[in-house]
Image (tube, grey):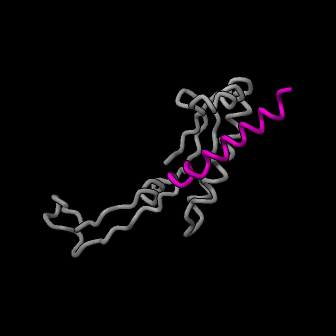
């Protein structure tokens, strides 16, 4: 499961023109800072049972894009949840390997919370970067 960090200025309205200038003037600093903000919030929002998922989270920057992700195979299931299951039929033995139903569980939606929390902080970061760097 991953969160892609790309500062897409094409959908910003006129009042955000100043932030667009910051991104264009300092593209590497903008993406480095924005991805670090997302990574910190992702770490804060990641649910912890054993700590394995939180320890597996990484941040990688590729030019003007960055990826914040967890390398566990179950991160998506924790985020999205799983529905109830009545077991699985195995054709080789001709029967269902589980009786009863697994109730499933609700998703924790930490990826969505991370994006919602990061957006205003990133805009403020870009505004501060522009205010401090340009005369």
Residue 90 in the image, given as x and y percentages of width and height: 19, 61
Where is residue 11 drawn, in percent x and y?
52, 30
The one nearer the camera, 70 or 33, is 33
**Does the image show residue 62?**
no
Which residue is depicted at the point 29% across and 71% down?
102
Location of residue 9 (image quadrant): top right
Residue furthest to the front in view is 15
Q: How many marks?
A: 0
Query: From the viewer's perspective, is residue 13 above or below residue 104?
Result: above
The part of the chain drawn in magenta is: 112-135
- Residue 125: say if magenta: yes
Q: Main secondary structure of the magenta part?
A: helix
Residue ranking furthest to the right: 135
Is 40 or 98 nearer to us in this picture? 40
At 57% from the left and 31% from the top, the residue drawn is: 13
Give the quarter of the image for residue 97. bottom left
Q: Quadrant of residue 10?
A: top right
Residue 25 can be seen, yes or no: yes
Q: Position of residue 79 (x, y in %)?
A: 46, 57
């Amino acid at each position: 499961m991953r969160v892609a960090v790309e500062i897409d200025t094409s959908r910003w309205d006129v009042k955000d023109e100043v932030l667009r200038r910051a991104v264009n003037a300092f593209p590497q600093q903008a993406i480095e800072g924005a991805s670090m903000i997302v990574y910190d919030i992702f770490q804060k929002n990641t649910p912890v049972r054993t700590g394995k998922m939180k320890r597996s989270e990484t941040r990688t920057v590729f030019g003007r894009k960055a990826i914040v992700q967890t390398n566990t195979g179950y991160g998506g299931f924790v985020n999205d949840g799983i529905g109830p299951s009545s077991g699985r039929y195995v054709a080789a033995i001709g029967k269902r390997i589980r009786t009863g139903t697994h109730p499933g569980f609700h998703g924790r939606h930490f990826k969505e919370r991370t994006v919602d929390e990061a957006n205003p902080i990133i805009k403020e970061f870009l505004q501060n970067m522009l205010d401090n760097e340009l005369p």
